[in-house]
Image (cartoon, coloured by chain):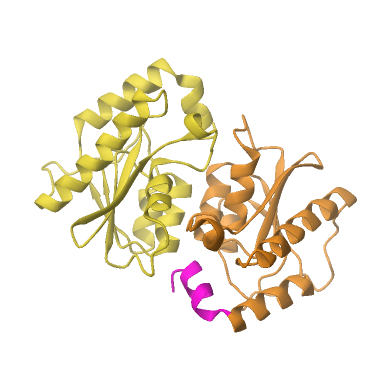
Chain colours: A orange, B yellow
Amino acid sequence: MTHEQPHSHAPELDSADLAAFEAAFEAAQKGLAEGGIPIGAALARDGVLIASGHNERVQNADPIAHGEMSALRAAGRQRSYRDTTLYTTLAPCAMCAGTIIQFKIPRVVVGEVHTFDGELELLRSRGVEVVLLDDQRCVDMMRTFQAERPELWAEDIAE
Amino acid sequence: MTHEQPHSHAPELDSADLAAFEAAFEAAQKGLAEGGIPIGAALARDGVLIASGHNERVQNADPIAHGEMSALRAAGRQRSYRDTTLYTTLAPCAMCAGTIIQFKIPRVVVGEVHTFDGELELLRSRGVEVVLLDDQRCVDMMRTFQAERPELWAEDIAE
């Protein structure tokens, strides 16, 4: 589906990055266990986790509650996001990319871009650093979901 | 602040457009009466109002609850937005513009662009029709708010 290739070697992530990314992955799994769409995200500041969240379209009948949006909502009001990183299991869509741009989040760590193209170029064009992983767990999680619930996935990306 | 000029003559809006835009304006006034940020929005399909909403940053400590987002959340899960129009009292920010693009909402009616530039060009570049009004009530509402609560306004647009 996507023509973009992730780093051939995993980019360097420090231990705080890895812990925050795991929080995003665990949020996605929690969403899946609830019967929802398995996409999760986490926000961290200077290596300290602020909040995580997952897609809640099914659970709360909330179309704007993508993983990234839920994590940002859970983080509450922040004076600034300029020292934060957002971690997400899947390439951000236009809604989530626009939010990252609007909130001036400078860095995004993305689990994979194989199962959804997202808006990585829009992010980069606005100066956001995109660290693209190639996390096979995230790929497998989404591929299974897309195969089992194609109509729900289509709804979530308005296709 | 903005260099974009609205239509020198008010664009033609039909009576359903006008009613939906009034719902957005009333939502903004409701938000203001609650102590919140006075920006409102409404979603309509084929001229019939689906939902309205207003900024809820203050009321719910929710940074993603801009007016447009609240209206879309209130509308719940929709199979498609291709036959909808979104009405908003103020030019959409990058979050709300990205959401309009992601949801494939084809048309947006904007109350004013004098007090915030927004992302009208991004919307147009993705094929969204932007109908820009020059509603003095919306301008006055935002100018008064920006003068009285500059720190809250700065927080809402991450400045």
Q: Hey, which residue is sitting farthest bottom in the picture?
A: A147
Looking at the rendering, which quadrant does residue A41 occupy? bottom right
Residue A155 magenta-highlighted: yes
Q: Can I make out residue B117 in this image?
A: yes
Q: Residue at x 77, y 54 (%)?
A: A23
Q: Quadrant of residue B37?
A: top left
Q: Is residue B75 above or below residue A157?
A: above
- Asked if residue B94 lies left or right of residue B28, the reply is right
Residue A86, x across and y down, in percent: 69, 50
Instruction: Looking at the picture, tell me which residue is in the foreground, A48 or A29.
Output: A29
- Residue at 51% x, 52% y: name it: A98
Q: Nearer the viewer, residue A12 or A144?
A: A144
Foreground residue among B26 and A82: B26
Quadrant assignment for the N terminus of chain A: bottom right
**Would residue A127 be seen by someone viewing this image from the given angle?**
no
Does A140 sit above or below residue B21?
below
What is the total number of numbered labels drawn onto the structure image?
0
Name the image quarter holding residue B111.
top left
User: Residue, x 50% and y 56% (percent of image)?
Assistant: A95
Q: Write down the region rendered in magenta.
A: A149-159
